[in-house]
Image (cartoon, helix red, strand yellow):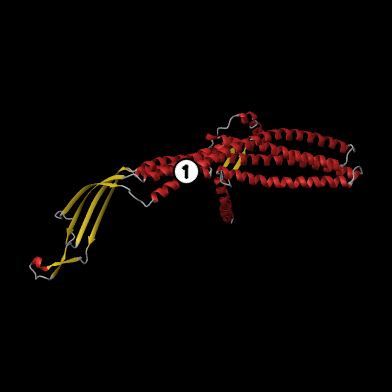
Amino acid sequence: MKKNQNQLTSHLFKALSLLLVYLFAPQLRAQEATNSYSYSLEEAVQHALQYNYSVINSGRDVQASVKKKWETIASGLPQISASGNYQNNFAIQQSVIPAELFGGNPGEFTAVAFSTKHSATASATLEQLIFDGSYIVGVKAAKTYLDFYETSKKKTDIEIKEQVINAYGNVLLTQENIAILEKNKATLEKNKFEINENFKSGFSEEEDVEQISITLATVNSSLNNAKRLEKITINMLKLVLGIDLEDKLNVTDKLEDLTMANLDVAFTGSDFNVQSNIDYKLSANNQEQKRLLLQQEKSKALPTLSTSLAFGYNGYNDKFKFTNKDQMWLDYSYLSVNLSVPIFSSFARSARTQQAKIALEQAQTQLTETEQNLKLQYQQAESEYEYSVEEYTTSKNNMRLAERIENKQQIKFREGLSSSFELSEAQRQLYSAQQSYLQAMLNVINTKATLQKLTAQ
């Protein structure tokens, strides 16, 4: 009996173990599949420059343009092709000839077949372009095409870096905001408890309790919203970094440390070299493409010269014997030189050339416009950065002043020298100053990133 009970217990234990494995195995696999990252801002930028989705695809664009360049070059190199053909003539086509050629009666015709039932052909051809103005221009255009995508890749990297800085800063802002709101909440809860106790003892009015309850409810609502925003901002950062949204991400830098690292007003004093700007380079590349397009249209008025070399074998038989050694194969070969000289196109070629010339003039105008826009953008970015630095100093001083005012009101309220309304006003002023200070720190980081984006090469 005892042995049976032990066996039953053993079976139940095994069944329970299998059930636990079945229930928790998916969670364990999910935990194993989840990655964890902990990055400073610089580390986050380096990660994004390797794994961001746009960065990856822009790198593929460069790879594709390299292949496109070689495709263009290869079109002017020797081209070798081979072909083969087998034909089974079920009903051989016949022609009629005068019968008298074969001893027949004059005026009569005889049907004659000039082919065999089976025929096979094999040939190989070598073609080589000797001169083509369009090819020469095309090779130059392929280089410009590659330069365009390489520059576009750099532009993508610069833009992603700015996006990482903005997203990283938003995460820090949300986390700092949560910390401040939790501190404010703790202070308000303590004040509410003290006021409520004073109200019970008859030393405070009910309005004082209600007033601080309103303030506490507002802070609670802001805190809950900030916690929801933290998850969203972290997921936005993950998206920019190319990290799966289910993975864990921790930011290690502090908002104030990054702000201090970006406080460099001397940075705005340097001259702006607009020609080193990525957008200017792309616009200049567009102008070069239009110039080459004009050259290509002009080159179509030049003659083209090419040559080809071919050799092959033909075989004929009324029976399929092409695999036999005694099959007769008739060889042939030739060398040809082909010259094509355009003479008159009813002014179509001239119209295309004029269109290309107009496109070039448009590209030149766009380049001038881009240059002027970039200069204006730099002036605006420089002004906004300098203002953000000034605003940071002002908001920091205002927050410290608001803290002193709120602290004094706390003391006065406890001593009965001020009302709950005055204390609430001081607290709201402090909370507003705290939010302004946080936003001012973020503005310093973001405006500096915008300025660096314009000067990046």
321 relative to 133, above or below: below
In what element is the residue under mark 1?
helix
- Residue indicated by mark 1: 360
Closer to us: 196 or 225: 225
Closer to us: 213 or 59: 59
Decide: few, some or many residues near mark 1? Use Cα within 10 Å; few <14, some 14-19, many ≥20: many
Q: Quadrant of residue 45?
A: top right
Residue 127 percent coordinates (x, y): 28, 46
Residue 233 percent coordinates (x, y): 64, 44
Which corner quadrant holds the N terminus? Answer: bottom right
- Considering every residue shown, the one lying at the far right of the view is 202
Residue 300 percent coordinates (x, y): 36, 46
- In this image, 374 relative to 129: left or right? right
89 relative to 409, above or below: below
- In this image, 122 relative to 411: left or right? left
Which residue: 68% across, 36% down? 441
Would you say residue 435 is visible in this rendering? yes
Q: Quadrant of residue 163?
A: top right
- In this image, 298 relative to 208: left or right? left
Report the amino acid beneath label 1. Leu
Which residue: 19% across, 60% down? 320
Would you say residue 254 is visible in this rendering? no
Which residue: 68% across, 35% down? 387
